[in-house]
Amino acid sequence: MSIEPGYHQFHPSQLLHDYVAAFRRGHKLTRLGSTAIRHRSLDARELLEYYATGQTGLVADLKAAHYGDKRRKRMLRSCKLLIEPALELARVLVAQQIEDDDLNIGSDLFELVLSRYGPRSIPSRYQTLHCEVANFQADYQRLHDLLKTYQGVHSSAKTVLKMNLLHPIVQKTDDWSDWTHSFAKIMPATTYNLDLTVEGENLDRLTAEPRSDINSDELITVIVTCYQPNRQLLTSVRSILRQSWTRLEVLLIDDGSGNEYDGILNECADLDTRVRLIRQAENRGTYAARNLGLDKAQGTYVTFQDSDDWSHPERIAVQVSQLKKSDNLKLIAVYALKLQGNLLYKRLERPKRDSCFPSMMFRKSEIQSDIGYFHELRKSADGEFIRRIEAYYGDGSVRFDSNNCLVIMRQGDGSLSRSDFGPGGWIHPAREAYRFSYSSWHSRISNNDDSPYLPRGKEPEQVRATSYLRSNRGAEKGATPKYDYVWAGEWRYLGGPAKSMLEEIRTLAESGKRLGIMQLDAYRFASLHVKPLCKEIQRLIDDGTVERVLPAEEAQIRTLVVRYPPVLQFQRSRPCNVTADRVFLLANQPPRELDGSDLRYVGRHCADNAKRMFGTEAVWVPQGPMTRQALLDDGTIPSDRIADIDLPSILNISEWYLPRSRFRNDIPVIGRHSRDNHTKWPGTKEQLLNVYPDSPEFDIRSMGGTKSARRVLERDTIPANWVSFEYDEMAIQSFLYQLDFWVYFHHDIRIESFGRAILEAITSGCLVILPPHFEPTFGDAAVYCVEEDVIPTVREIYSDFNRYRELTERAIEHVRNTFSHESHVERLELLEKKY
């Protein structure tokens, strides 16, 4: 279902405060902005408003002022405003453009900060973006003034924006000389003209003279693919025919356009005897057409040209020259300037000159013999092909020549990839998923563990591409895929939630069910760029155990399990076309701590957002008794929407159990592993030393860092009897096998939902000692006592190994009955029957 773009909910100030505090600690301001842009989230604007002003309503005030509210204008002149958060909010507004006036309101916010604090207070990246906004709005007088005001505008942006100011449309003249002079500062200098007799846009009229003809015996093949072309194809082909390298064959591959396009195709073929028209009977996509061209190519070198682009006359000569200079260089591509058809630049926060994948050139015989062909998708296969070459031949084999900008890529509504890339580093999720999938194959190629060769028309093994990349320009629809179970959550990091979901997937993997995973970003883990999924889940995707389900693509799910509720706290406006018969929100942590601090999510918001995305009312499933009580105490979730069945984490006992035949040392070895967070340790020095004593009688080991513990102990170093390992410094099983006792006492404010680390320690064969409030969750799997009784309990059990073994065997039996794969399937089936 499509999510209403104008919807957002208002968040309690404590939630905004706690999130902003986390962003400040991690210096994540631009990460927050980029994540908000990628999600097109109105909700996230409140976070930036709070960051900038300590309250919400800044955007509403700006809108009112924009439309003439004088009182709001006066308020804005004196309101509290932190410069960089305010500028980041302006960046989000102009990049998202969810509402009709977002661009104007974002521009007003840039102007407000500039007027109040002056140009020197504004960092270079925001100076550049402010200029781009004025250009995007076609406010060329303001652009002119800003370029004079700001001293920190990026040089590449300044060059292109100044070129725009010299455009005849802006200058209201018919004289192109100033513009072409400025254009020659970006493209190689030559004689540029506009032939106004040519039909079409200004780009179709642009001509450039080669410096001199190069008459070589070596034939270069240029493959131009097209589908239902217009007269822009003539521009593309003409620019190739005007190359200084004259010995060319231009293979014009028509991708099943139909007879009604005979006229334009024949007109292109008649331009020159070097043009050969080849027609496919059916539309199969750009890369299938390119593969046909590779088989027909007779040139020593092969390159490509998109059907609406324009190449500088020196492009081919420059590329051939570079390939001839180095045997190690296998593929060379140049850079492109992306302009509209009228030759105006109009982009926001994107590279001014960008790598041009279609310009790739390589030696035909070598690459076809070693690498083979393009993956025959509809989109994105050129990046895979280039990176496969680099994976096989190694560093230095592929070069994107940023010093040579030799192509104009036409920006317009007809561009195949235009809608797949956006400000803030947004990439269509189908392209992301494909890139991460083929990266695994390429890693095996780099290690000589797999072949890089792809036969024509074949699918690479263990590389997954969704229907969006396979369908005709992303528009064709087949049967809607149906899944039995899908796990949605934060899959980029191998933390407790991801580990638990992986275990659940493995539990059901042999059941014959169709399984999927869905990535939902959590704002606590906001990132500047799109990050890959953790390797463990990517392997399961690559081998077909699970499929990646993208919210934008249609899918029907019988049971959707969303683990880690904060992934649903902030609504996103990008479409969600996934529906689910039932949605279980698995609460693996409470909304907030016992003292009310660190508010992570509002249950009502998460449930509302789940319904908007997936079309059904969610049922909350606690991971343990303490979280159940926290959900009830929170008061935002109706009690009848909280399941009466817990769904704790599970482990495979056979993979974790390490039986002990003796104690590890001649003194008790006590340990723990967890994130180095202050809530994961006792809150006072006395409490901490009661549990983890500073005494040579005990060997204390911790994995995950001890910075928080040292802060509680008020010392720079850990006690002499302690050993500290960093997080994941070794395999968890290896660490646990060093220990006799695994002891975990946390801060008084913390509500521990379940504790996967606890279950890992129990299942490994350690004797686990916990505070009494864990007993309803772990029962006979642990020993329980208060802090001051930890050491007496350790001494008592350490004096009798038989007693130790009896307690650990009882614990393993409890795990087998309560936290095994079989018990999980039973609980899940019971949940499905009841809800």
Image (cartoon, rainbow, N blue to C red):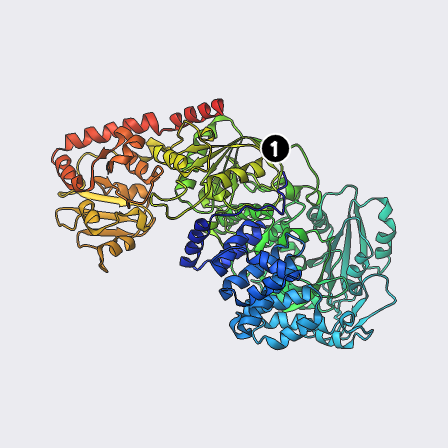
* Vertical comparison of 251 with 495: above or below: below
Side (left or right) of 78 relative to 215:
left
- Where residue 478 appears, as percent x and y from the top left, is 68, 34
Give residue 424's quadrant in the image.
Answer: bottom right
Q: Residue at x 41, y 27 (%)?
A: 644
Q: Is residue 210 left or right of residue 102?
A: right
**Would you identify the image quadrant in which residue 477 lies?**
top right
Q: Is residue 274 left or right of residue 508?
A: right
Residue 517 or residue 536, whichever sits in front: 517
Q: Position of residue 203 (x, y in %)?
A: 78, 64
Q: State whether residue 332 appears in this view.
A: no
Q: Nearer the viewer, residue 617 or 68?
A: 68
Residue 400 position, x and y percent, is 60, 63
Q: Amino acid at mark 1?
A: Pro
Horizontal and vertical percent position of residue 414: 74, 52
Q: Residue furthest front?
A: 71
Q: Which residue is mark 1?
A: 481
Label 1 SS: loop
